Amino acid sequence: MKPAAFQYHNPLTVEDAVATLAEVAPDQGRILAGGQSLVPTMAFRLATPEHLVDINGIEELGRLAVEHDALSIGACVRHAAFHRPVLEGGFGALLTRMAGHIGHYPIRQRGTFCGSLAQADPSSEWCLAAVTLDASITAQSSRGRRTIAGADFIEGIMSTALDEDELLVETRFALPAADTRFGFVEFSRRAGDFALAMALASFRLSDGVMIEARLGIGGAEDRPRRIAQAEAELNGQPPGTPAFEAAAAAVAAELDPMEDAGTSAQYRRELAQCLARRALESAAS
Amino acid sequence: MTDKHDLTLTINGFDHAITVDARRTLADAIRDQCGQTGTHIGCEHGVCGSCTVLLDGVPVRSCLIFAVQCEGLAIRTVEGLAEGDELHPLQRSFIKHHALQCGFCTPGFLMLAVGILENEPNIADADLRELLSSNLCRCTGYANIVKAVRAAADELREGR
């Protein structure tokens, strides 16, 4: 239960961090941010990186700011930063609600938003938010910077579009229109456990009908995704039971859920259907 | 491969100059190299919370942080709660409400609770229960732990 030996690097600038990462990535070099997923994996010796590049000393990566109509979240912003809303209105409240489901209070003091994306656990709350709400993710390496759309970032279970020498430096969300409504529901058997499924819904109302509907499901498949067929059941309809049930049924029909020893695909499908409906009801209320 | 680092850990206001391998967790360094064995180690992978300490005022799992990351940070452990012979109100409350049996999880619960109450002095009952679910107690003393922390929270608030 002790991590294997590694070499520790603690750069103080992003430039130094990506230069070091480029050097050590071929020798199983990894970034260390909050460490709340990586370090347990190392304790089990499931991960034995030979180098860790600790980014906690890089001041600019702790930035959490609203600018140019976007929320920018630096690589070292902790989950606990969202314990209280970082923005007024529905979006800030949504992020606070989602943060409360991540691990436990001490884990949230240390784990980071961007680390959660880079880890790409299928039941990550922040991955679901990034995919459903179209985050843009900035990766930097010694070769330069590029931006990756949330929907393209996650490629499978713990697999992302990041190259081995790239550091996820920032995640941005365009600020949703002020009248956007949000609902988020997740289910796990015990507080703090990984979600068996979760649903994130958002829409606006125009002349009594829903527009710009988004419905994302996480924890059920190998990666979170929006269910376009469900969104089609919502747009142009008044919010209420008929549309919500049609959308939830579309979720059930579309999903190809993961199975594990304690959870059948059918159970996860029905759970996701239920959570989709509840997330929509929560957004409407 | 060894990667040794000389560093100073500041625990309860006292400096400890130590040399650690990079792979050494904060929990192991606190116990084995700084001799502060009040911090317990249970699962060593962030699940049980026995090793909870305060790092710059917030509770963290010390088994999930490397000692080499902690130079210059204020570390507080259970040894720092009492003032001389005078127990911290939370420690007194744990005794009064029988919030421990075997005592293995107690240092972790105390540091978790101190961290919560210092950051959220007016915490609601439901939120307190949720946050106390962070740590495990295998003597199943949760009801009394909640009671003890609630009573201490009220005492600390009135004392302010």
Image (tube, rainbow, N blue to C red):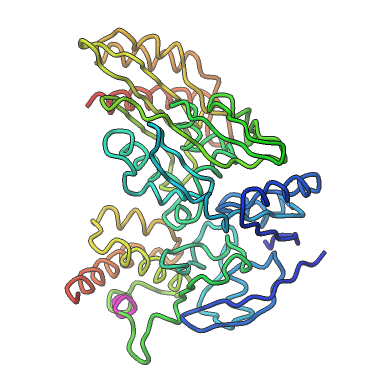
Nearer-the-camera pick, A68 or A94:
A68
Q: Which quadrant of the view contains residue A93? A: top left
Q: Give the dominant element type of the magenta stretch: helix, strand or loop.
A: helix
Where residue B70 sits, quadrant-wise, is bottom right
Judged left or right of residue B119, residue A73 is: right
- A128 with respect to B98 (left or right): right
For image coordinates 23% across by 61% down, the residue present is B122
Nearest the viewer among A183 and A204 is A204
Q: Quadrant of the C terminus of chain A?
A: top left
* Location of residue A221 in the rendering, given as x and y in whole percent from the top left corner: 55, 26
Residue at 80% from the left image edge and 44% from the top image edge = A26
Q: Position of residue A75 (x, y in %)?
A: 54, 46
- Quadrant occupied by the N terminus of chain A: bottom right
Q: Which residues are magenta?
A: B89-93
> Would you say A249 lies left or right of B25 here?
left
- Residue A192 magenta: no
Residue A222 visible in rendering: no
Q: Relative to B14, is A121 above or below?
A: above
Classify A257 as above or below B56: above
As displayed, is residue A7 above or below residue A85? below
Q: Of A158 and A273, which appears nearest the observer?
A: A158
Q: Is residue A138 visible?
A: yes
Q: Residue furthest toward the left?
A: B158
> In the picture provided, is A99 more to the left or to the right than B9?
left
| Outermost residue toward the top in this view | A236
Instruction: Report the residue at 36% width, 92% height from top.
Output: B85
User: Would residue B91 be counted in the magenta stretch?
Assistant: yes
On the image, the x and y values in percent for residue B30 come to 58, 76
Residue at (47%, 20%) from the top-left corner?
A226
A211 lies above or below B4: above
> Which image quadrant is residue A179 in?
top left
Q: Can you name the residue that lies furthest to the right here? A: B1
